[in-house]
Amino acid sequence: MGARVETDTDILVVGAGPTGLMLANQLARRGVRVRIIDRHAGPSLQTRALGVQARTLEIYSHLGIVDRALELGKRATGGNIWVQGRRAARIPLGDIGRDLSPYPFLLILGQDDNERLLGDGLRNRGIAVQWNTELVGLAQDTRHVTATLKHKDGTIDEVAAAWVAGCDGARSAVRELSGIAFEGAPYEHVFFVADTQVTGPMVPDELNVYLWREGFHLFFPMRGTDHWRLVGILPPNLRARDDLTFEEVIPGVRQEAGAQLSFKACTWYSTYHIHHRCAARFRDRRCFLLGDAAHIHSPVGAQGMNTGLQDAYNLAWKLALVVSERAGPALLDSYADERLPVARRLLSTTDRAFSLVVSDSWLAGLVRTRALVRIMALAMRLERVQKLAFRTISQIGIRYRNSPLSKTLGSLPQAAPRAGDRFPWLRLKLLPNGSTEDLFGKLDDTRFNLIMIGQAAPPGGVPELGDQLRIHEVPSDPANDRELARVHIPRPSFYLLRPDGHVGLAGTHLEAAAATRYVSERLHVGRKDAGTTGAR
Ligand SMILES: Cc1cc2nc3c(=O)[nH]c(=O)nc-3n(C[C@H](O)[C@H](O)[C@H](O)COP(=O)(O)OP(=O)(O)OC[C@H]3O[C@@H](n4cnc5c(N)ncnc54)[C@H](O)[C@@H]3O)c2cc1C
């Protein structure tokens, strides 16, 4: 890095969808100068994504918006699979993640509500989205980015930012102006989505999935009486129609999901094509891609919005450390190292799941509608399968074990949490003779957290982290020992957690020199001029 350049803002966030709002919130609460723009006139009123995963709720809890989200949303307690008009299986979803997260369920809460909560949070931090402001140009040198912005009245101005975050959706201007390819293809199927008031055989307050030979219809329970979000794919004979109305879709839905369906109102209806694509790189020097700007995939598994929110949570603490010159810019390389593999894996799993669900082939149809349903229902009765499914879908199972930021020292047992994992949710007595507390509630996600088990923290903590560190010593206690044993954490051990709750450094005995080496070599703390490739 050369001499510091005066910029108008530290970070310019382009796009005020869920990803941009999450990033701006996380930066603002870490004291970073942030500006957020969007080309639209105001917040989107469309529901779009509906499922909020446990990992997102954990982040919402640190942001102070989880109670409101839980109040507004509906917990999905079960999923019912219907085949040829008959309920073939019920998959219990309520609390399948018991002991794994404080939020052991999927919350049904529309994207518009999520955006409103995130927007309110941002306003409370004194930052307003600049609507009607479109990014139309980018130029960068080694020290800053000049962004050209176009306003609604046609005027143009330029903003100098140290870093730009492209949270500008599938048609990302940041991605296109940076010349980053968006590799992938569209699916041939045409989806439709409708917010309806409807009565029928659906099990109230639960997900209802109607499978048919050529596709599916999903009914999501929404807030309000008889209010359901209906998502499906159009039968082949209707795919080519641009002017299709919801009334014309209804007979097909009734044929597959039941003649008793009675539609009373439809407040939103849209058809759309879905693509599966991933950006070739998540970064061009000082410009990053996050959310739909970086990856888009089928909605199977309700992962899209949640993955974008998680991208933002991963990048925010790193940008905050670099902007405040506590860490060198090489720390930022780890954003793509960690999030690109997550996106690629997600694309391949949602692709496989989607292909199975919508395959036109007779054999796949038979497998899907009969054998698969029975196998799924039986398997989901097993606790191990329930937990695996929850870990995967809720995104608490995402880990960065191969990241340059992950270092496991010494001989931790194989089953113990390792560097790169999200540290497990525990209820511990953190004071001798104290009451049991939710550890996640005690962690400060704007700082690093050092958890010491069966040993005292080194005198002076980890001096290089200074006030960026909180220390939690876990006293010896039978209840604590049982809780630690449940997740295979041995005594003694230590875990240095990054602000986003993932383990950075872990081992049995913490030695001050090892911590110092980790902080300097891996986190680049105190290394303002450490280089960065800027190309991932
Ligand atoms: C019909 C539909 C249904 C969906 N259902 C689900 C679902 O059930 N589950 C799920 O997880 N996901 C679903 N998704 C996907 C989900 O909506 C996205 O993953 C999510 O919106 C991504 O958020 P984002 O903030 O990254 O991008 P976006 O929400 O697309 O936000 C990008 C923002 O950037 C702004 N912008 C764009 N270009 C510029 C520019 N040049 N300058 C300034 N601003 C700009 C846009 O105005 C927009 O506000 C669905 C999507 C659609 C279309």
Image (spheres, rainbow, N blue to C red):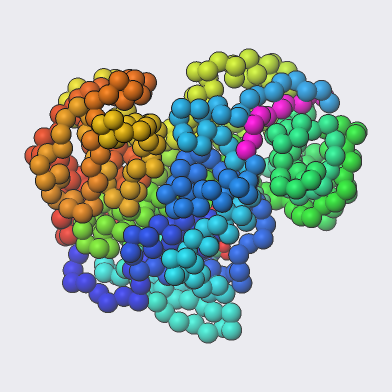
Q: Quadrant of residue 371?
A: top right
Residue depicted at x 65% and y 42%: 74
Q: How many discs appear?
A: 0
Q: Main secondary structure of the magenta part?
A: strand
Q: Position of residue 471 (x, y in %)?
A: 23, 42
Residue depicted at x 67% and y 57%: 46
Say whether residue 170 is left or right of residue 316: right
In the image, the segment drawn in magenta is 75-84
306 is higher (above) or lower (below) than 381: below
Residue placed most toward the observer, 147 or 421: 421
Residue placed most toward the observer, 201 or 522: 201
427 is higher (above) or lower (below) than 118: above
Q: Position of residue 268 (x, y in %)?
A: 76, 55
Q: Position of residue 296 (x, y in %)?
A: 55, 47
Asked if the stretch drawn in magenta spans residue 82, the answer is yes
Which image quadrant: the N terminus?
bottom left
